[in-house]
Amino acid sequence: MIRVQREDFDLGTELRALTDGNHAIGGLASFVGLVRDIAGGESVGAITLEHYPGMTEKMLKRIEAEALERWPLDASLIIHRYGRLEPGDQIVLVATASPHREAALESCHFLIDWLKTRAPFWKLEDTASGGQWVDARDSDNAAAARWSKRSD
Amino acid sequence: MKLLYFAWLKTKTGVSEETVSPPAEVRTVADLLIWLKQRGPGYAEALADIDALRVAVNQEYADFTDPVAPGDEIALFPPVTGG
């Protein structure tokens, strides 16, 4: 399940809905990305997240489909917000559920690493020196690359 | 073809969305970027460093050698920074 929205989400409500009634689930893993107040040594007042309607949903669905193919998951959820967000606000939720913990934990980690390099969102930081578009980081690409399947 | 600009590409070109009809010789993403650069100073500045940008054709990531055709939706943007 993929949601791209402005509105905030309630973690407890979303996690409960994900596992509701499915008692085959033994492990539920989640990650929440939050807005920080410091970036590159400068204090950040707010961020604005821009996205590409249409392609955003398409890429998130594709990333999720890959996780469902690679791990035995009972359910998965990605919620990504856009618009103006302030330090402490939730940006993204990734949650996965499986009979056992390893698939849930690994797939959750995979989804957030992949999302950060493939989902078309761009962050504009509101700093004392004006609006700055955040640069993508090599460490994000390296993190995503770790999940590439070995060729047999 | 429809062009979409995001993040600082939009700021520098001054355009978020436009419809263009490049000449028939524009067949690839690279051809399109070269053609766009000469349309004005904002475009030249936005496209000065090709390595700094990414392209999607019909909502799929594209290489500079990929084809572009009338009716396509082409988006130009910096490397993504979501999550």
Image: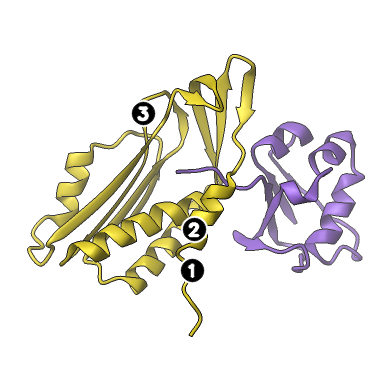
Chain colours: A yellow, B purple
- Asked if A118 appears above or below A10 in the picture, the reply is below
Residue at 69% x, 35% y: name it.
B8
In space, the residues marked 1 and 3 are separated at their CA atoms by 31 Å
Q: For mark 3, what is the residue?
A: A89
Q: Amino acid at mark 1?
A: Ser
Q: Nearer the viewer, residue A147 or A54?
A: A147
Viewer-nearest of discs 3 and 2: 2
The residue that label 2 is drawn on is A144
Q: Are marks 2 and 1 in contact (CB under 8 Å)?
A: yes
Q: Amino acid at mark 3?
A: Asp
The answer to whether any part of residue B57 appears in the image is yes
Indicate the position of residue B50 as horizontal and vertical percent values. Answer: 79, 50
Residue type at numbered disc 2: Ala
Quarter of the image for residue A141 reads: bottom right
Indicate which disc, 3 or 2, sits on the residue closer to the N terminus: 3
Residue A26 appears left or right of A7: left
